[in-house]
Image (spheres, grey):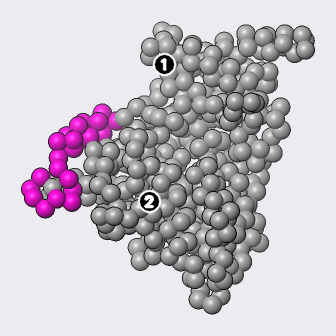
Amino acid sequence: MPASPLQPINLDNAAASPLWPEARQAMLEALSLGNPSSTHAAGRSAKQALERARGQIADLIAAKPAAVHFTSCATESNAWAIRGLLGANKRLSGANKPSTPHVIISAIEHPSVLSAARRLELDGAISTTTLSVDAEGFVSSGDLEKALTGQTVLVSVMAANGEIGTVQRIRELAGVARSHQALFHTDAVAAAGYWPIDVKAWGVDALTLSLNACHGPMGAAALYVREGLRILPLLEGGGQERGGRSGTEPLAAAVGLGVAAEQAQKRLSQGIAPLAALRDRLVRALRQGIEKLRINGSTQERLPQNAHVCIEGVSSESLVLGLDQAGVLAGLGSACNAKAMRPSHVLKAIGLSDEEAAGALVLSLNWMTTESDVDQAAAIIAKVVEPLRRVSALTARIR
């Protein structure tokens, strides 16, 4: 049965994915609980629910619960990691660290990381180095080694890119940073729930996590901070989250995040191969149905739910809008403003020209995606592309 606009096939899970039923039910129950900071019975029940969620998230990343701090979103977690770690650790090696710390990031980081670093640099608080990536989106450990200096306090490289799907070799990169006494933070939002994470094995000092792309609620995230590591609070006030993040905890959202983490851990324990097979099935069908289609990102080390394509002869915006009308939700692979369409900074970083990046689509599956979803979506995408290409070719001839 073809997809209906009223019941679309969701291939834009990087933006939002359906809640696990278990998470929804837990959130509804949490709405009737009290404030976790209250000392009466209702508050104690709320506190227990909050700590249960903290433990569920810790299990997902192989951490201790005390190292997990709740935040409102991944953007807040990233900002807190960068500002808080810098503020508390400017002089990691005493006199060897000057008053202007050095920070290293990659060219394909999420805007929340790029903007936080850029703002601090504009304010004169830090100097930064931005590492380039290769054609598949990998950060080179050799490039990181060359960029590290005696002034480097923090390195921030994302665990996986949510646009092109490439999974970084975080353990290797973190080891290089550690050998130079630099802290290492990773934004693991795109990987969380779809890729095994072990903060100790990876050797990271801080890790950002949310699960709205993996059947968790929006408005809830977490920041892992290695036990014993100093970090200044981003928000000050009532001293919640052991003084790290003041403000009344969003209990229902945190509980939903915890249950989503537990459900994701169950799927991960069974392996990511079935989800990767669905992704590969989608890619094969797209290749068969659409000529002049480019697949971006790593061919091997990539997220199992991610496929990033560029389709020649169409624009990303018209393609996403056409798919929406046909009953398929897809991610816009290029950032647009009021004046022009431009390739995303990620596509530019891996070396694509504006022409090569045209028709970019971020296609992301979830743990509930079926073979029928994939097959229908591939057929619909091919049907939408054909008339758009004809219009594009006609417009080009008229010009």
In what element is the residue under mark 2?
A: strand
| Image point (47%, 40%), residue name | 213
**In x, y percent, where is residue 3?**
50, 13
**Label 2, residues with CA under 10 Å away: few <14, some 14-19, many ≥20:** many
Q: Is residue 44 above or below residue 294?
A: below
Number of on-image labels: 2
Amino acid type at circle 2 is Leu
Q: Is residue 281 above or below residue 128?
A: above
| For discs 2 and 1, the disc positioned in front in the rendered view | 2
In what element is the residue under mark 1?
A: loop
Q: Disc 2 to disc 1, how far (Cα)?
A: 33 Å
Q: Which residue is mark 2?
A: 223
Q: Which residue is mark 1?
A: 8
Magenta range is 20-42
Q: Is residue 122 above or below residue 45?
A: below
**Label 1, residues with CA under 10 Å away: few <14, some 14-19, many ≥20:** some
